[in-house]
Structures are given as C-alpha cells and as structure tokens.
Image (tube, rainbow, N blue to C red):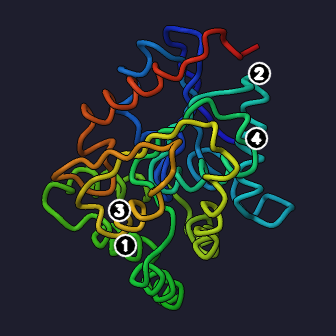
C-alpha cells in the first residue's frame, strides 16, 4: 500500500492530494491549514516517493493503471468511497487517468499546473534526457528539467523546493517514471467523455510555458471544466500563488460538496 498522511479537519468530506514527480506530499504545505478548516485530508506519496514502495517491488508492469489501483487501494483501506482530488503537475495526470477509469470515485477535481499532452519541445526533452540518463547523475538531470520548467526569478521558491524534495528519491525510482511520459496524452483523451458529470477546476500559471497553451486548447468546449490562469505565475501554482490557489480551490469544492457525506 502507498505511504500516506491522514489529517483530520472539519466537515465530513475528504480531499486527496497527489503530488508531482520527484516531489512528495510535502509540496502541499501551503494548502494544509486552509483546507483543514472545512475538510479532512489524505496526502498520498506516489510509488517510489516518500515511504511508498519502490517501483521495482511491484509484480505487475508499472503503468498509470497500476498507480490508480494503488491509490484506490489506499482509499479503500481508509473506507473512503468518494473524495475531492487535488493534483499538481504529475498528480494531474494521475487524476485524469482516474477520471477515465473510475470517475465515480471523484466528487470534484482541482488540477494545478495540469498536463494534458506534451508539445514537440517537451517530447524532445524527454527523449534527450532518456538518452543521457546513464552518463550524468540523475540529480543533474532533475535540476536541468526543473530550470527548464520553472526558469524565471519568481519561480525560484518552487524550483528550489522541487529540487530539495527530489534529493530524497532513489535514482531507480525516478527513472522508472520516465517511460510513462509517452502515455500522457492517452490519460486525457477520454476524460471529457468518461467524466462529464464530474466538475473540474484547472488552475495554471500564465508562465507555465511547457503546458498551458495545450491545456487551454484541450479544454475548449468542455462544459464540466473551468480554467483559471494566474498572472506572473509558473508551473507550481499552488506554491507561487498559494493564496489565490487555496481560495479558488476551497470555493470550488464547497460548491460541489455532497449534501449527504458519502464516506463510511
């Protein structure tokens, strides 16, 4: 089962927090206090992150299907049938796959720095990183990717935090996530069709140059989604613009709370 932290707050419903690659649930440190005023929180560490099992410990092929199964297994253990999901970066890809495969488990979804597909530069970058992976330390690779994703001065705090968290990750686990990059587009391809009844709020920075343009294009015509663009903000909007992110998220989840808790 995945490593998780359970925080008891106010109210009856749960928020599930899903972090980005190389990070951990610690990336939501600016969300805990405001979210707990109205919700309980389950902060999950992805496979190969935090104290979750190493990726090579799984008998089945590592895939987005297996990741979603592990997340749901954790929620089943906690007797949580349905929850609000908040994902950032890689976490949004996992939420998208969940929306395609098990939409009934999602009460609402907040997706920060969402990724629906990679542009040509992103695909080339992933391929290049994979080619040189055996020739340079993986932390050099991670630092380079962090600088490319978050290049500006106002991205410094989130860039530093991401790099700091990645030092806690094993090289083999970091590299095991790489082959999944080719499946990113597939995790979103049927989201609108399969989860049209699930309300979704997308929050992205205007300076999230790798993903925001493709995201805006893909969300056109999706009546179940809202997109908010934060000015002077990069990829990790929940850190860079925490107050705005928190306010938008809480107002959205409050609007879509169940009148009767669906938690045993």
Q: Earlier in the sequence, mark 1 or mark 4?
A: 4
Q: Look at discs 3 and 2 and give the one toward the viewer.
A: 3
> Is disc 1 placed on a helix, strand or loop?
helix
Q: Disc 3 versus disc 4: distance between alpha carbons?
A: 33 Å
Q: Secondary structure at mark 3?
A: helix
What element does badge 4 sit on? loop
Mark 1 vs mark 2, foreground winner is 2
Write down the residue under mark 2.
79
| Structural distance between the alpha carbons of marks 3 and 2 | 35 Å
Q: Residue furthest right?
A: 59
Q: Is residue 264 above or below residue 200?
A: above
**Residue 250 x/y as whole percent:** 40, 24
Q: CA distance from mark 4 to mark 2?
A: 14 Å
Of marks 1 and 2, which one's residue comes earlier in the chain?
Answer: 2
Residue bearing mark 4: 1
Dot 3 and dot 4 residues touching (CB under 8 Å) = no
Q: Residue visible at 56% across and 66% down?
A: 174
The answer to the question of whether label 1 and label 3 lie on touching residues, with beta carbons closer than 8 A, is no
Q: Is residue 253 visible?
A: yes
Horizontal and vertical percent for residue 191? Answer: 63, 53
Q: Position of residue 9 (x, y in %)?
A: 50, 12
Residue displayed at 72% across by 31% down: 75
Residue behind mark 1: 145
Q: Nearer the viewer, mark 3 or mark 4?
A: 3
> Which residue, given by chain and number where applicable, does mark 3 sit on?
212
Would you identify the image quadrant in which residue 148 lies? bottom left
Q: Is residue 229 above or below residue 182?
A: above
Q: Is residue 172 visible?
A: no
How crowded pointer 2 is (Cα within 10 Å; few <14, some 14-19, many 20+) is rated as few
């Amino acid at each position: 089962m995945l490593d998780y932290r359970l925080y008891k707050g106010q109210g009856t419903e749960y928020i599930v927090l899903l972090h980005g690659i190389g990070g951990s649930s610690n990336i939501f440190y600016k969300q805990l206090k405001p979210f707990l005023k109205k919700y309980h929180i389950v902060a999950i560490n992805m496979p190969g992150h935090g104290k979750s099992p190493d990726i090579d410990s799984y008998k089945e092929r590592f895939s987005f299907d297996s990741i979603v199964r592990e997340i749901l297994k954790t929620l089943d253990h906690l007797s949580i049938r349905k929850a609000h999901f908040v994902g950032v970066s890689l976490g949004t890809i996992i939420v998208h796959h969940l929306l395609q495969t098990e939409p009934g488990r999602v009460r609402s979804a907040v997706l920060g720095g969402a990724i629906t597909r990679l542009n040509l530069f992103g695909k080339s970058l992933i391929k290049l990183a994979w080619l040189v992976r055996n020739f340079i330390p993986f932390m050099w690779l991670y630092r380079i990717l962090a600088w490319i994703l978050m290049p500006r001065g106002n991205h410094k705090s989130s860039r530093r935090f991401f790099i700091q968290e990645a030092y806690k990750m094993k090289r083999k686990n970091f590299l095991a996530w790489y082959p999944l990059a080719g499946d990113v587009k597939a995790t979103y391809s049927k989201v609108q069709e399969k989860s049209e009844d699930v309300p979704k709020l997308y929050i992205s920075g205007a300076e999230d140059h790798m993903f925001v343009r493709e995201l805006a294009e893909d969300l056109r015509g999706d009546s179940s989604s809202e997109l908010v663009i934060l000015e002077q903000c990069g990829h990790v909007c929940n850190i860079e613009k925490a107050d705005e992110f928190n306010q938008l998220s809480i107002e959205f989840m409050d609007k879509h709370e169940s009148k009767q808790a669906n938690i045993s």
